[in-house]
Image (cartoon, rainbow, N blue to C red):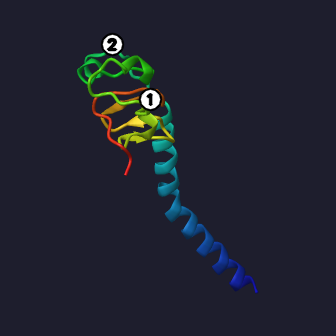
Amino acid sequence: MANQSRRHFIRSSVLGLVSLPLGIGILSKTAFAQSLPRLDPSAPSAQALSYVEDASNASDHPAYEAGERCDNCMFYTADTQGCQLFPEHSVAPGGWCQSWVAQG
C-alpha cells in the first residue's frame, strides 16, 4: 500500500513539474498581451495607415466602407485587443485603418 502511494506521489510530482513551464508561458504571454499600451492615433505608424480610434471618423477616407472596424478585421485579436499590424500596442475595437481586411 505504501509503495503504491509513493508511486502515485512520484507520478503526480513529475507530471506537475513537466506542466509547470507550459503554465508559466501561457500566463506570462497573457499578462504581457493585456498590458500593451493603446496605440496613439498620432504615432507615425498609426498615421501611416490612417488609424482612427472611432471608425466613423474615417468616413471621408477613400478606402473606408461602412461597417469596417478593428474588431471585424482579420488582423485583430479580440482577447488582447491587439493588432498584427501594431504588435506593440492594443487598438480600439471600434477603430479602423486603411489595411482593414474582412475576417475569413
Q: Which mark is residue 28?
A: none
Label 2 residue SS: loop
Q: Of the residues shown, which amino acid type is indicated by label 2?
A: Ser
| Image coords of residue 4 (percent x, y) | 70, 84
| Image coords of residue 81 (percent x, y) | 47, 35
In the image, 100 versus 84, the foreground residue is 100
Considering only vertical position in the picture, is 16 above or below 85? below
Considering only vertical position in the picture, is 92 above or below 26? above
Binning the other alpha carbons within 10 Å of mark 1 as few (below 14), some (14 to 19) or many (20 upward) gives some
Q: Quadrant of the N terminus?
A: bottom right
Q: Which residue is mark 2?
A: 42
In the image, 10 versus 62, the foreground residue is 62
| Image coords of residue 9 (percent x, y) | 66, 73
Residue at position x 52%, y 57% in the image: 20
27 relative to 101 in the view: left or right: right
Q: Which mark is residue 36?
A: 1
**Which residue of the protein is positioned furthest toward the right in this rendering?**
1
Q: Of the residues shown, which amino acid type is indicated by label 1?
A: Leu
Residue at position x 51%, y 41% in the image: 79
Residue 75 shows in the view? yes
Whichever of labels 1 and 2 marks the residue nearer the N terminus, that label is 1
Whether tag 1 and tag 2 are in contact, CB under 8 A, the answer is no
Residue at position x 28%, y 33% in the image: 99
Label 1 residue SS: loop
How far is the residue under mark 1 from the one under mark 2? 17 Å
Q: Name which quarter of the figure residue 91 lies in.
A: top left
In the image, 36 versus 18, the foreground residue is 36
| Image coords of residue 32 (percent x, y) | 46, 36
Q: Name which quarter of the figure residue 2 lies in.
A: bottom right
Binning the other alpha carbons within 10 Å of mark 2 as few (below 14), some (14 to 19) or many (20 upward) gives few
Residue at position x 55%, y 69% in the image: 14
